[in-house]
Amino acid sequence: MDTILALSSLCPRLEAQTALVKDEAAGQSRPLIVLAGADSKVEKAAYYRVSSEEAWQRIWLSHLGKTEEDRFREQMPIVQIDFKKCMVIAIFKGAASNSRGLDIISIDEQDDTVSLRFDDMSYQTAGGLDGGRVPVTPYAFVVIPNSAKLVLIEENIQSLKEKPPVWKERAMLKAE
């Protein structure tokens, strides 16, 4: 049986004056849902703003390493999103090592931009000729309410955990 995750129930109570869910305790916005992991079939870094079912199906199948024909022959997870109310920001880090996926650090809404910051959930290994590195392909699908604003994506590239974050712009995504 196919696994179906319907996200439309997460979006119906959105209010016109705010595009993002506010986390009052933290004083910042947060996504409606994040699907993240380290096993995408997308091997090159890429960033997408997905606001239609057609685009979502294309990106989802690419992430799974499947084709349109595979949808009818194989059992695979199905994720349904209400694109009248929500959009997806898809982040593919590409081929990497020692990561459990991508962590969404913050989403902040300004007058003309929605800024999304993420970090790699990395870990260290040791041993072997390659240092014990585990090859992975980290990703995150971030579901937020629709917005006509630009979406700025930034990654924390700091090298030492004890130091403050260093944010590097990875993409600026326009509305379709």
Image (cartoon, grey):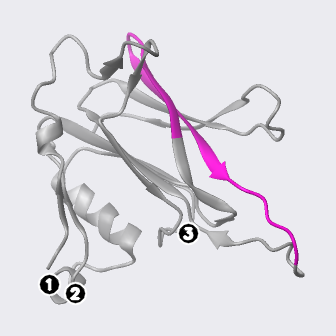
Mark earlier in primary sequence (1, 3):
3
SS class of the residue under badge 3?
loop
Give the residue drawn at x 46%, y 16%. 26
Residue reaching furthest to the front: 25
Q: In which image quadrant can residue 15 be found?
A: top left
Q: Which element carries disc 1, helix, strand or loop? A: helix
Inspect the image, locate mark 2, and give the three-letter code of the amino acid beneath it: Glu
Identity of the residue drawn at 57% across and 64% down = 44
| Up-down relation of residue 161 to residue 55 (above or below) | above
Q: Nearer the viewer, residue 67 or 117?
A: 117
> Disc 2 or disc 3, which is closer to the eye?
2
The residue tagged 3 is 43
- Describe the element under mark 2 as helix, strand or loop: loop
Is 169 on the left-hand or right-hand side of 152? right
Camera-near label (1 vs 2) is: 2
Magenta residues (range) = 104-127
Marks 2 and 3, the one that precedes in the sequence: 3
Left or right: 110 in relation to 118: left
Residue under label 2, please give it.
Answer: 74
Q: Give the x, y percent position of residue 57.
A: 23, 63
How many marks can you see? 3
Disc sitting over residue 72 in the figure:
1
